Image (cartoon, grey):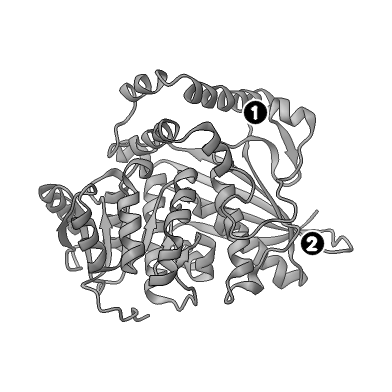
Amino acid sequence: MTFKRHGREYDIVVFGATGYTGRLTAEHIAQHLPTNLKWAVASRSESKLHDLINDCNKVNSDRPPPSVEVADINNDEQVHALAKKTYILITTVGPYTLYGEHMFKACAESGTHYLDVTGEVPWVAKMIEKYEKTAKRTGALMLPQIGIESAPTDMCTWLMAKHIRETFGSKTKDVTMSIHKLSSKPSGGTLATVLAVFDTFSMGELKSAFEPYALSPIAHPEPTRQSTSFLTKIFGVVTVPHLGLLTTSVAASTDGAMVERSWGLLAEAPSRKEEFYGPNFTWSEYYKAHNWLHGIVLHWGLIIGATFLALVPPLRPLIRRFVFQPGEGPERDHASKDEIEYRGIANPDTSVPTGKQAHCRARYEGSMYFLSGLFLAQAALTILEDDLELDGGVWTPACLGQGFIDRSHGVGFNIEVKTMDV
């Protein structure tokens, strides 16, 4: 496919390209995106950028190397200049709570399409409040949380709703997602992000950002997630047909915020209204438990860990001393053995039960951070090639539609949906 004409120097710039996720994103672009792409890698260190270019050349020596752009995230003049040079800006510089607003603002003001891999929902809520009107005016498509958080669950939900619409001629009543398998270690950026969120936002701000449908542009008539039994609330364990024994997911609130924003955006956007999930839609996410004891330990471990991080601030500097630092992560040989699998079910919203439901399975073998780089690169290619019929604003992975899913599937994120008996 041909690229859109835009009159900018670059099609794509990867900012923070010398960091852990940024480097993997650049390597994915070098290996998989079209060779006629005009792109650049950017960070504070020119020497590290040249080292990265050498690594990209090893990945694919048959394509021209990217250009080099030097910019400091704390220098507004450099950040704005970089944003104006490119059609799409990918930024992997986090924690976004500390460093993300400069680039978000610059892209919104410059009409530059923006992608990041944050999972910091309170920060995303703040960016929507401050800059969505600007992005709508300039035409910038702003897509936060398009890495491992929260592209997979958002894509799976959209695809199951599409399957239900086409198979049963129905809206979607509910979706239950499960992280069925996960083998990965967090990078320094991920751990720094968690600590930064607790350092920056008050408990009231955190609670407000994670309220059901808080990020949706429209109100939900029943703004609650699926109800749970008393025992599930205490022990965190529930059994769901086709998904098995499940427990609390650490990503549920983060992923839920993005899925529920998709719900509202699909209801509002003129080009997406037929994709709207439906007025009675509810969503939930869990983690696959090996057994009851495993599920209970994970559930209470998350509660106790979050409580200590929130209420015992001196604990945070101590944690920082013993984990990867930002820009660092697991060794590649180890990370290449990582894997993740999602499973989900969705029920049609019909007056008479169909006895059928949609079932989704999505999986990836390899580094979770390379998967985030995959999503960033393939989302950028989708914006560059497809007529998305979207106006400027803050969008979600699901709003990129089938083209994004197909491109991601083609490079290793395998996703399939089928009909199953209830």
| Quadrant that contains the N terminus | bottom left
Query: Which residue is under mark 2?
Result: 349
Residue farthest to the right, as pictured: 352
Q: Position of residue 70 (x, y in %)?
A: 15, 54
Q: Quadrant of residue 270?
A: bottom right
- Residue 146 seen anywhere in this rendered image of the structure: no
Depth check, mark 2 against mark 1: the one in front is 2
Image height of 421 relative to 35, above or below: above
Side (left or right) of 405 relative to 92: right
Question: Which residue is at a point 18% across and 56% down the rendered structure image?
Answer: 78
Question: Which residue is at a point 61% across and 54% down the rendered structure image?
Answer: 260
In the image, what residue type sits under mark 2? Asp
Side (left or right) of 208 relative to 375: right
Secondary structure of residue under mark 2: loop
Secondary structure of residue under mark 1: helix
Question: Which residue is at a point 69% across and 56% down the rendered structure image?
Answer: 220
> Earlier along the polypeptide chain: callout 2 or callout 1?
1
Q: Using the image as rendered, state which of residue 163 and residue 226 is in the foreground.
A: 226
Q: Quadrant of residue 155?
A: bottom right
Side (left or right) of 148 relative to 415: left
Q: Position of residue 246 (x, y in %)?
A: 67, 36
Tell me, for residue 295, which label it has, or none.
1
Q: Position of residue 268 (x, y in %)?
A: 61, 69
What crowding class fits label 1: few (fewer than 14 Cα within 10 Å), some (14-19), or many (20 or more)? many
In the image, what residue type sits under mark 1? Gly
Is there a contact, CB below 8 Å, between mark 2 and mark 1? no
In whole angstroms, how far apart are the C-alphas of marks 2 and 1?
30 Å
- Residue 161 seen anywhere in this rendered image of the structure: yes
What crowding class fits label 2: few (fewer than 14 Cα within 10 Å), some (14-19), or many (20 or more)? many
Image height of 114 relative to 215, above or below: below
